[in-house]
Image (cartoon, rainbow, N blue to C red):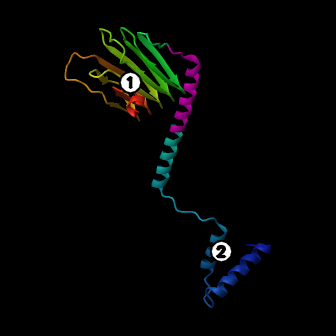
Amino acid sequence: MIDGPRSNRIGSRIRLENTKDAPGDFDRTRLIHRYQNRRTPLTLPCSRKARIVWFVFSFIFKIIRFAFVGAIGTALAAKFLLESNADVETEEIDLVAIFEGKDLVSSADPFYGGKVLAMFGGVLLDLRKTQPAPTGIRIDLAVIMGGVSLVVPEGWRVRFEGKVFMGGWSDNTRTTAEEDVPTVIITGFLACGGLQATTKSPVEAAV
């Protein structure tokens, strides 16, 4: 049983609604339900399917967030631990670009390839002045939220044998039909990044 001022407020509200909405036909259940709805915040019904969908999306968002934070932490650590070993005449390069962009126009003779790491950064590797090694050119890529532009002479082949995760690569070279042309083999992976193989650098293509 309700006592005190609250009981008076409920009673007065019920009597008021009875007078306005249903004079002479007092429906206590309807009036109490209406009063309670005014005191309770509006809530929409949520089915089991909707709760499952919300849980899945929330879980995926948390995984993406943790992966992004982990990638930034890894990049910061690699920024201080890894150093580039890539010069104009370096025959086998170790090129690292983290939170920055790096350009390398190689003229090595011979050029074997090497490793390229791009995290939250970009790399431009120009091989038009190099002489390919007798064993061919093999470049191992690791691209995470970055991009790599590979410039080769006209007639060279570029073959991508790596893995792509939420990224992509494009081959804009003009490959001849000959089988014995120099071939650049690309391995490694692209994660939220891109690779472009072309015969013109982005600066020349924009002119």
Q: Does 179 sit above or below residue 64?
A: above
Mark 2 or mark 1, earlier in chain: 2
Number of the label disc, if any, that sits on residue 150:
1
Residue closer to the observer: 116 or 58: 116
Q: Percent position (x, y) of residue 82? A: 54, 17
Question: What residue is shown at x 19% (from left), y 23% (from top)?
Answer: 177
For label 1, count other residues whose C-alpha is less than 10 Å away and answer few (under 14), some (14-19) or many (20+): many
Which quarter of the image is occupied by the C terminus? top left
Question: What residue is shown at x 40% (from left), y 20% (from top)?
Answer: 126
Q: Given the image, on which type of amino acid does mark 2 rest? A: Tyr
Number of the label disc, if any, that sits on residue 59:
none
- The question of residue 197 being in magenta is answered with no
Q: Tell which tag, 2 or 1, sits nearer the viewer.
A: 1
Predominant SS along the magenta part? helix
Q: Percent position (x, y) of residue 133? A: 32, 9
Q: Which residues are magenta?
A: 64-84
Question: What residue is shown at x 47% (from left), y 54% (from top)?
Answer: 50
Q: Quadrant of residue 198?
A: top left
Q: Given the image, on which type of amino acid does mark 1 rest? A: Leu
In the rendered structure, the answer to whether residue 179 lies left or right of residue 188 reads left
Q: Does 188 sit above or below residue 34?
A: above
Which quarter of the image is occupied by the N terminus? bottom right
**Which residue of the protein is positioned furthest toward the right in this rendering?**
4
Q: Mark 2 — residue?
A: 35
Residue closer to the observer: 77 or 60: 77
In the rendered structure, the answer to whether residue 26 lies left or right of residue 88 reads right
Helix, strand or loop at label 2? It is helix
